[in-house]
Amino acid sequence: MARLLCVAAVTISLVMAAAAAACGRSAGPLSAAAIRLTSPLGGGHAYVEVTGLSDEALGALQRADLDAAQWSDLLRVAVTDEAPGMLGSYGIADGALRFTPLYPLDPGRQYHVRFDPVRLPGAAGSDAPPLVARVGQPALRTTSSTVVARVYPSGDLVPENLLRMYIEFSGPMGRQSGIEHMTLVDEGGQEIRGAFLPLDYEFWSPDHTRFTAFFDPGRVKDGILPNQQLGRALEAGRSATLVIDREWRDAHGLPLKEEFRRRFRVGPAQDQPLDPASWRIQPSPSVGRRDGLIVTFPAPLDHGLLMRALGVTRDGAPVEGEVVVDEAETRWTFTPNEPWREGPYHLLALDILEDVAGNQIGRAFEVDQFETVDRSPDPKSITIPFQAGSTGTR
């Protein structure tokens, strides 16, 4: 096996061993138990180990058929004392109980480790206290530089039934939850509690520079119980401020360079389905040129979905090009990689396209699909034809 380098070790001899000896009880296999974080010299994920267990205890663990929950009860690694245990694999290696996380640990972040000897196979009746420690790898940088670069919707006015927000950062962020670092405050500076939906997993872009935060849909959608009890987090005619605190850690384990605040006004709910007939397409692009095809919308659409649910096709095949969304998400510009050719093209809108309140083509977010009076069609992809014309005919 490759040599190992211990980058951050926490060795905690169990005080209970001395107490047990004073009371005439044997500390047994736990007298030298310790927690440490180890990183392989040749690369790979750092892992957490419990060392100093007896051969008897390790053998019992190897023979035991523990499920994921039982392993986590025995050895739990988490970002906080209250957070759920991290995903990963358990096993016995080099005379120690080992946990290898599914995803790499964030440099500079401290993790909470709890080993509960009562959960060892055959330890029924034991009153040994848990062994706890905090472990972490050093930060890769020492100076904070990551900031919140953009928040979508980008306009100053949002509907009171806003469904989601996108937070874009200037650099990659860590894998930990972001909701705990986001707060909405009202005009009086008071927190609007329960605005965002807490999830067991997070919605990150592949490069970890874009985070999606969902407003609780139970409060957003009119007429259902959470909405009736709590109302919407946003209220038309008022304003709110999004606050993102500095403690949100980047990929180097460092806090953000500065706190972020963004104030916006709240307007009436958007409760009508998308109507492609209201979209305006710029006159035909010129053959032989790479003019941008511009599509404008009467109200902002969802920025993330605009980047992947709207495109251009020719003869049923996608046309490759670059997309720019601006004007507070009311304008979409497509510039082809190759010059336009004479003949028909189509603007393709996939059925996942939504506005910022979750309304789709042909169906509003507020529609209850279980109501017999609902005669709105299912969302569907649509195509809008356009022609590339001769140069100078625009």
Image (cartoon, grey):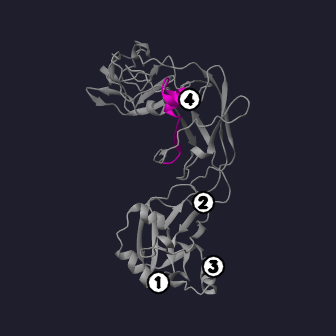
Q: Mark 4 highlights which residue?
A: 229
Q: Closer to the camera, 346 or 156?
A: 156
Q: Are marks 1 and 3 in contact (CB under 8 Å)?
A: no
Q: Amino acid at mark 4?
A: Gln
- The disc label shown at residue 109, or none: 2
Q: Is residue 172 above or below residue 48?
A: above
Q: Are marks 3 and 4 in contact (CB under 8 Å)?
A: no
Residue 30 left/right relative to 277? right
Q: Amino acid at mark 1?
A: Ser
Q: Mark 3 highlights which residue?
A: 15
Q: Residue at x 50, y 16 (%)?
A: 298
- Residue 391, horizontal then vertical, whole percent: 39, 17
Other residues around mark 1 within 10 Å, as few (<14) / some (14–19) / many (≥20): some
Q: Amino acid at mark 2?
A: Arg
State which tag comes first along the sequence, 3 or 2.
3
Q: Amino acid at mark 3?
A: Val
Q: Are marks 4 and 2 in contact (CB under 8 Å)?
A: no
> Which residues, given as a range, are shown in magenta?
207-229
